Structures are given as C-alpha cells and as structure tokens.
Amino acid sequence: MTTALGLAVLVLATPAGPAPAQTKPPAAAAKPADAAFDLAKTAADALGPEATAAVQRDLIWTGDLNSLASGEFGKRSFDAIRAFQKRIKAKDTGILLPTERDQLAKAAERAAAAYGFKPVTAQGITVGYPAKLVTQKTATEHGVKYSTPTGNITVDILRYAATEEAFEPLFTRLKTERAGRKITYSLLRPDFFVIAGTVDGKSFYMRFLKTDEDSRGFVLGWDPTLSPGFDRVSIAMAGSLALAGAAPAAGVPASGTPVAAAEPPAPAKPAGPPVPLPAGAPSAPKSGIGFLVSARGDVLTSAALVAGCRTVTAGGASAPVVAGDAANGPALVRLAAPPKVAPLPLRLAALGVGDAVELVGPAGRSATTVAALAGPGDDTRRLTLAAPGAGGVFDAKGALAGLVAGDAGPVALKALFVSAFLRANGVALAASEGGDPAAAAVPLTCTPGS
C-alpha cells in the first residue's frame, strides 16, 4: 500500500508535462516583514536611543522583550512591540502609536508595582529589586541578603575585594559546575560578567561590575515554578545595575523610593588620575586629540591617551582629567578657557553596515565605512570600521557617531555608549545637526605622572 509520504514524493517527482526552460529561479521579492521592520527601525531611530531604551524597558516589564534595554532597535524589539500590539488587539506594525505607547507605559508600571520594584544602594552598587516580595534582610559575609519568608526568592548584593579574589578568578569560580549546579549561560567582559543557571533546583542570575578595588554585583535566585513570569525581574535588575553614585539606575520606576545604604559609604579614592597607567606601560609623553562637547569646556578624548595623567596640556594650558572609563575607552578633560566654538551634536540614529563615516584624528581626516555593527567577540558596544584610525567618528552631517581608542584600531565605541558616559558625568550632547568636527578638535598632550 502506498503511504501518504510515498504518494507525495511520486506526485512531486512526476512532471505533468514538459517543463518550461528556466536557467534560474526569479529573484525572490522582498518579504513584507522585512519592509515593515525597516519602517519600524526608521521610526525608532528618529525617536533616538533614550526613547527607544525607555520603550524596551517597558517591554521587559510586560514580558514581551527578553533582552537588556540597549537603545538600539533590532528584530527582538520589533517582534516585542508587535506581540504587545497583538495582545491589545491593535495593528501589529512594530511602530507604537501615542495611545499604544501610553498603554505600554501603564502596563509596565503596573507590572513593576506588583513586585514593588525599587532601587536599593548597598555594597557600592545601586540596583532595582522586588522589595514587595523579598521582605526579610540578613547580613552575609560579603554583603546583604533579601529573601521571601519561604526562601523561594533571594537577592544577594555582594562585594569582593580585589585583594581577596580578583575579578577573573571570581568569574571562573562562580561559573564552575558541580553536582546539583548547572551553568546555562556565562559572559565575561573587561568591566562586567554575567552567569546564569540552576543550583539545587533553584534558578539563578548574577551580574557583577569590576572596579579598581573590587567586584560588586548581585545574585538573584528563584524557584523555577515562578517562571516565565518572574524572569522579567532578572532582566530588569540587570538593566538597573550601576555603581553607586555613578549614574541613575535605568528601569527603576520614578516613584520608587531609594532604600538607605546598608553600609557606611566607601572611603574616598586617593588622589590620582581617573585612568591609571597600566602596569608596565611606558611613561613617555603622548599626543592626541579631543573634541569639545560642552560650553563649559568639556573635551571628549580617549582614555588610553590620558592614562596616568591628572592633567594634560591643551593649547599650551594645563587641563585636568575629570573622568575616564578604561574598559570602554572614553575620557573627559576640562579646559579652563574653552574656545568660542559650538559643542558637537550627537548622532541619535544608529549607524548601519555600509554607512559612510569620517574619522577625525591626529593624522587628519579620512573617509571610511561601517563594516560591522559589533566589535571583536560580538561586543555590541562597538562598531567595526573598514579602515583603522584614531579619534572621533562623525556622520555626513558632522554629528558625533562614535569614538576610536588611541590604539589606531578599526573598532569604535558607539555613540550610544559615548552618550551614556557623558551623561554620567553631567554632559548632555545636543541632538542636532551641522557640527564642525575640525573646529571642535583640541590637540592634547599627556605626560604620565603630571
């Protein structure tokens, strides 16, 4: 007896008549979904990264988005918006109408309120946590633990001194499997690590930040029977994590009342450069370039250029190094007498592969293109350019679109992360056009130890 599968094969294999001559199949038409995504991405880029990140944070709370709020619009965000629109019986375009955006914000606020999600500052970090659930608090060897009365949800806020256990050895230890402990995900970056898995029948997610003195972070544990609804809490906590005092925690409802620190404030750092000179690095003078980004004289430059310097020379005058992020690459120098030049605008729309950009650096100006939307190791904070260089990355309208570190490599920190660094240090770039990178360029010289 001929099976259904065999019959199907026979029908497909037997031509009904002479086959028409055809050298190759016609090119497939563009999928409608692709066109819809492109339209939605254009709309999101017009809103800018901060507004896009706010939408993403709300989508996390409604359970539609299972990733951190990066401010960059991709297929995950597109699909998440469409899922939300379908649920509220709206047309699933991937573009939120004002009334839909309001519905999303209110739904997210209700979800966060159900957990009592609010920020707490302890062990040198600020992070949002489900305060309505984890009501019991106890001190631990490395920090503080919050838990439910039954222990089915726990939040540990921890700090490990680098002299006790360095950052990478800590990561290695915490991702080690044993009987009853399985790691389902782990990621190590120069400035943070993430580990997730299960231990003794309980799900867990941890995220730690690296500083010069220690490793600080949290571990969230929960009964897997609470998933998938509870999983959004781990994503919201990850997105809210920040070093205490460094920047506001993202994704924490504005109505949340900060919880008093569970410890005395950390002692002030000894005087020294914001970016320490790496061990073994030469202490010879270095010259480079920075760009004026505020009317008060803030100059954006590379952390590699100013490493080891408390002040640099700019236009013959000394200027203090006021901030630096060695892991990501940006730094700030402040001029005592800023030139009468308009600060640079910031490009809000994300760059795409093939987009033309200009590198402005010590060697002059050169044209290149975006070769990839991530850096080595799929580092989504960075762009890979088609040609190496150093200095600032600018779009065709003269808006700042990224920063290349002083190693003259082809990898640039994206504008979104440059903007986050600047905002954390009290600088907000204008979202406008018509910048003049050459006029805003400031030659800098650093002599380590000065």
Image (tube, grey):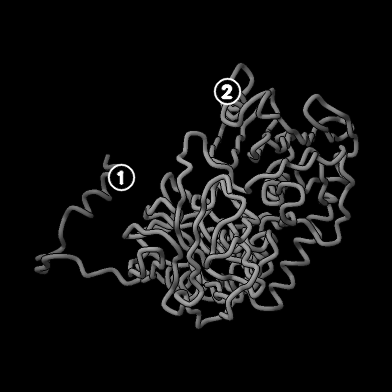
Q: Of the numbered discs in the image, which one, if any, rests on residue 5?
A: 1
Q: Is residue 302 left or right of residue 232?
A: left
Name the residue rendered at 54%, 52% in the picture: 306
x then y, percent, for residue 258: 86, 52
Q: Tag 2: Cα neighbours inside 10 Å, few (<14), some, or many (≥20)?
A: few
Contact, mark 1 vs mark 2 (Cβ under 8 Å): no
Name the residue rendered at 60%, 18% in the picture: 178
**Nearer the viewer's eye, disc 1 or disc 2?**
2
Query: Which residue is under mark 2?
Result: 176
x then y, percent, for residue 196: 61, 35
Q: Is residue 85 visible?
A: no
Spatial CA distance of label 1 from label 2 is: 48 Å
Q: Earlier in the sequence, mark 1 or mark 2?
A: 1
- Label 1 secondary element: helix
Q: Is residue 149 left or right of residue 141?
A: right
x then y, percent, for residue 398: 46, 77
Q: Of the numbered discs in the image, which one, if any, rests on residue 218?
A: none
Q: Where 206 falls versus 433 (above or below)?
A: above
